[in-house]
Amino acid sequence: MSDDFELDVTLTPDRHDTLDDFAAVARDVEDLGFDTVGFGETTGWDSVALLTVLADRTGTIGIADEVIGPFSRSPSQIAQAAASVQSLADGRFRLGLGTSSPALVEGWHGLSFERPLRRLREAIDIVNQATAGETVTYDGEVFTPEGFQLELPTPVEVPIDVAALGPKGVELAGRFADGWVPQLFTPEGLERRLEDLRRGAELGDRDPDALRTSVLLRACALEDGEKARQLGRQHVAFMISLYGPFYRQSIADQGYEGMVETVRGHWQDGDREAAVAAVEDEVLDGLVACGTPDEVNAIVDEFAAIDGCDAVRIGWVGPADDDAIEATMRAVAPNNR
């Protein structure tokens, strides 16, 4: 693992009953030496509220969201929140943007999942314009704000990380954003997709080395390595079967189309045990990192060695309980490696 490589962590806010509990875990993460702490948002705790708590209750660790989308909030609203959080965080905040998924956009927000990449591109432009202190006038194909500016101290620098899986989305990140947060890639799959990031940077006349790539790696590190691997299999089977078409397609495009069809077929037939068993070892050792602490850290190091990968962002597998999460967090923590 190179000396300049960073380790991030992503928390699961919905596991915590109170914001005080969430903040306590974030402080623990900070004490363990992680570089950035982030979290996802679905239908639970609101991202902006959580970011405010993290900005207030932590001192040195970077903070991030994963991800705010321009379907659930307008770009101007995102800019307003980002500038506010950054002022509270004294420059430690990175804004995560992404298109989210059809299930959340349509089922939770009641909106049509139309032109997601165009919407994301325009949101990046508007956020940058607003946080620079400019009067926002933007004649987009989706958004057309005009004549207002932030009533906050500006300019304020807010780095934007894009969560994307497909080649066009990753190219967009390279061309317009400041970083990329991929997930559910094997090391080989990530190396191939990094070519799209570099192409986007070239199209935008930007230095690809200036972009921060932090790969989200779901992990479970237990002394009982087989138990950890079984939890990993359950997680991958769930992601393939229920977590939306983008993740499923991304795994298939990495050379595992047959496995994806088998897993999903068993799941749809109601045989979840067979679906979990169909997750191949080769996939399990790349898409996620599950096993003994040594095995998990070896996979982290493999990602660390990839040219263009600046950080590994450790997350948890869905079926893991609180004890497994605690053990994993401490097994991979920078201060314990």
Image (cartoon, rainbow, N blue to C red):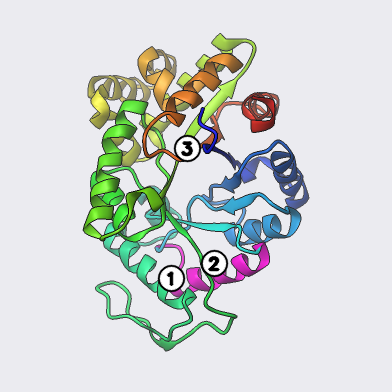
Counting residues from the N terminus, which is met first, the one under dot 2 or under dot 3? 2
216 displayed left or right of 260: right
292 displayed left or right of 300: right
In the depicted view, which residue is nearer to us: 332 or 235? 332
- State the residue at coordinates (30%, 30%): 189
**Secondary structure category for the residue under label 3:** strand
In the depicted view, which residue is nearer to us: 109 or 229? 229
Q: Is residue 128 above or below residue 303?
A: below
Please state the horizontal and vertical placement of residue 73, each as a whole percent of the image.
46, 66
Which residues fall within the magenta stretch?
71-89
Asked if labels 1 and 2 touch by Cβ distance under 8 angstroms, the answer is: yes
Counting residues from the N terminus, which is met first, the one under dot 2 or under dot 1? 2
167 displayed left or right of 148: left
Counting residues from the N terminus, which is met first, the one under dot 1 or under dot 3? 1
**Secondary structure category for the residue under label 2:** helix
Q: Amino acid at mark 2?
A: Ala
Residue 127: numbered disc:
1
Task: Report if residue 78 lies within the magenta region.
Answer: yes
Q: Amino acid at mark 1?
A: Val
Residue 12 lies in what quarter of the image? top right
Q: Amino acid at mark 3?
A: Leu
**Secondary structure category for the residue under label 1:** helix
For residue 249, say whether it is visible. no
Residue 195 lies in what quarter of the image? top left
Residue 207: numbered disc:
none
Residue 216: numbered disc:
3
Disc 2 target residue: 82
